[in-house]
Image (cartoon, grey):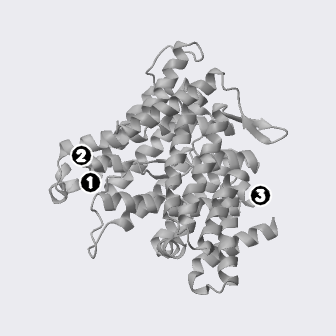
Amino acid sequence: MFESLFKLKDHDTNVRTELLAGLTTFLTMAYIIFVNPNILGTTGMDSGAVFVATCLAAAVGSFIMAFVANWPIGMAPGMGLNAFFAFAVVGAMGYTWQQALAAVFVSGVIFIILTVTGIRQWLIEGIPASLRSAIVAGIGLFLAFIGLQSSGLVVDNPATLTSHGDLGSAPVLFAILGFFIIVILDVLHIKGAILIGILAVTILSVITGHSTMPEHLVSAPPSVAPTFLQLDLAGIFDKGIFHVVLVFVLVEIFDATGTMIGVAKRANLMPEGKPNRLGRALFADSTAILLGSIIGTSSTTAYVESTAGVQAGGRTGLTAVVVGVLFLAALFFAPVAGIVPAYATAPALIYVAILMLRELTSIDWKDMTDVVPAAVTVIFMPFTYSIAEGIAFGFISYVVIKALTGRFKDIHPATVLVAALFVLRFAIA
């Protein structure tokens, strides 16, 4: 059955290898089970329902990737996009989480249209590489700032806006310990380093009396009803959430597409000059966003951690099926997710942020017409506490600087279009 579904022999793999690869990928990305409810819970969403929605969205997304594209890529609610959803759209802009879910749904619909019509590929080719890298790095800094705040390492200060927190407090010390555990385990190439770090801090927190152990570690999953089909579509049109949808679409395009191409190339699934299944993978990714918003979570996307499974030999959709099955199994461990404190997940945010900052090396630092817009993008995201503002000022500054220095050939129509949409958004705000 597996051979007929996934063509294992054609990809020079077998069931045992695919199962091991799926387990490896799951362990490296399972931290989202604990992080996502913590982040989205700040919006007023029911944490138990978000936990279920996270597992279901990851499972459904991975299954779609497996059976539609036959690629070994795990899917789950994306880091960065969940922070934008919670802290920017709901926290800073004042939308309800129901309206934010509706924005994700609309972005999913647009995403499918862009994918099917080929416009997505046009946008990817048209947006300059420097801005694509800057968006990833800027989201990384935004995540780091959130992680530092939730751990207590950074606190507000009336005189300087921010300063360090109480370095002798238990939450801060636990967060620092968790960070070093994650870094050291990852450097030693131990699978599931981030997950181990989160669980280690949670266990220590329980032992020292800072968290309460639940009566049962395993239980029936909580109800997903508090978030299922709770989209406020009418609300987003009343309040004008156009720019939020635009940011969701842009980040989804660059983040997910870049991840999928990177993983696929590592698995040799995109040989030069030969047909590949990228179009199917892009469609699977778009569909997963739509379904995730219906279930009740922020945008579902391809996980770069899938490279760990590819490194373990994963080459087909069977790897993704294993990831999906394990996320379904995780549904029965909701009590464990309920005791994970924010300072246990904060180190994961900070470390993921550091990994995202590696994108800065892809920028041509000798060309200031590329460097300045990229730097503007990266700097504005954490300092304005908004991914949207960072992207907007980055695109606008790119077009202005290139045009006024006579570098018109560097400006693709897609870049001009995005910049114009942001200018329009500022004009009517």
Residue occupying the point 40% across, 34% down: 185
Which of the 4 quarters of the picture holds residue 333? top left
In the image, is 10 to the left or to the right of 342?
left
Task: Specify the amino acid type for callout 2.
Answer: Glu
Q: Are marks 1 and 2 in contact (CB under 8 Å)?
A: yes
The quadrant of the picture occupied by the C terminus is bottom right
Compared to residue 410, the image places residue 329 above or below, namely above
Please report whichever mark, 1 or 2, sits nearer to the chain's N-terminal start.
2
Q: Secondary structure at mark 1?
A: loop
In the image, is 72 to the left or to the right of 169?
left
Q: Secondary structure at mark 2?
A: helix
Task: Specify the amino acid type for callout 3.
Answer: Lys
Compared to residue 163, the image places residue 276 above or below, namely below
Spatial CA distance of label 1 from label 2 is 7 Å
Q: Nearer the viewer, residue 308 or 96?
A: 308
Camera-near label (3 vs 1) is: 1
In the image, is 349 to the left or to the right of 60?
right
Pinpoint residue 226: horizontal percent, then vertical percent: 61, 36
Q: Secondary structure at mark 3?
A: helix
Residue at the farthest right position: 159
Q: Which mark is residue 178?
A: none
Q: For mark 1, what is the residue?
A: 316
Mark 2 surroundings: few (<14), some (14-19) or many (≥20) residues within 10 A: many
Q: For mark 3, what is the residue?
A: 239
Mark 1 surroundings: few (<14), some (14-19) or many (≥20) residues within 10 A: many
Q: Nearer the viewer, residue 346 or 233?
A: 346
Spatial CA distance of label 3 from label 1 is 44 Å
Residue occupying the point 71% across, 47% down: 90
Q: For mark 2, what is the residue?
A: 18
Task: Specify the amino acid type for callout 1.
Answer: Thr
Spatial CA distance of label 2 from label 3 is 47 Å
